[in-house]
Image (cartoon, rainbow, N blue to C red):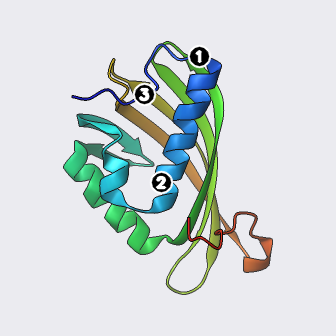
Amino acid sequence: MNPRPPLPPFTEASARQKVQAAEDAWNSRDPERVSLAYTEDTEWRNRSEFVTGRAQVVEFLRRKWNKELDYRLKKELWAFTGNRIAVRFEYEWHDDSGQWYRSYGNENWEFDEHGYMARRFASINDLPIRESERRLRLERSGS
């Protein structure tokens, strides 16, 4: 496996770099691209759903972004130590009826020695909002 820098043990700067890379990848809404940051046997808990392995990650993300339209995410480093990072995040999206949501959550990440995420545990809550209440907008470039 090719290393995926930055590698643990994390410093504040390298942890922030890892968080930004994750935010950028998730905002691409490209399940295959996102899945490449995880180990082949990665373990996830996302809300009440459990996912194991890259193939299930891709399937999960396809379903997610088919439901969560015009998804836009912002992540923030909360804490780090050794090979672990804790993140708080919020994202906005709408469903196919046009109802907007802001989803808030926390993630705990654990990385292998090559810089791939082996574990991701996410707790998320959704808040219905009006479109006029949005804070996260897509940039004109589409990123």
Going by the numbered disc 3, the residue's amino acid type is Pro
Quarter of the figure with the N terminus? top left
Going by the numbered disc 1, the residue's amino acid type is Thr
Q: Where is residue 76 in the image (x, y as percent from the top left)?
A: 66, 39
Tell me the tag on residue 84. Answer: none
**Looking at the image, do the residues carrying marks 1 and 2 touch, with CB atoms under 8 Å apart?**
no
Mark 1 surroundings within 10 Å by alpha-carbon count, few (fewer than 14), some (14 through 19), many (20 or more) = some
Can residue 54 be seen in this snapshot?
Answer: yes
Report helix, strand or loop for mark 1.
Answer: loop
Can residue 123 be seen in this snapshot?
Answer: no
Tell me the tag on residue 11. Answer: 1
Kindly identify which residue carries mark 3: 5
Between 64 and 29, the residue placed more toward the observer is: 29
> Which residue is at 69% across, 68% downward?
137
| N-terminal label among 3 and 1 | 3
Report helix, strand or loop for mark 2.
Answer: helix
**Looking at the image, do the residues carrying marks 3 and 1 touch, with CB atoms under 8 Å apart?**
no
Going by the numbered disc 2, the residue's amino acid type is Trp
Q: Is 101 rendered above or below residue 116?
A: below
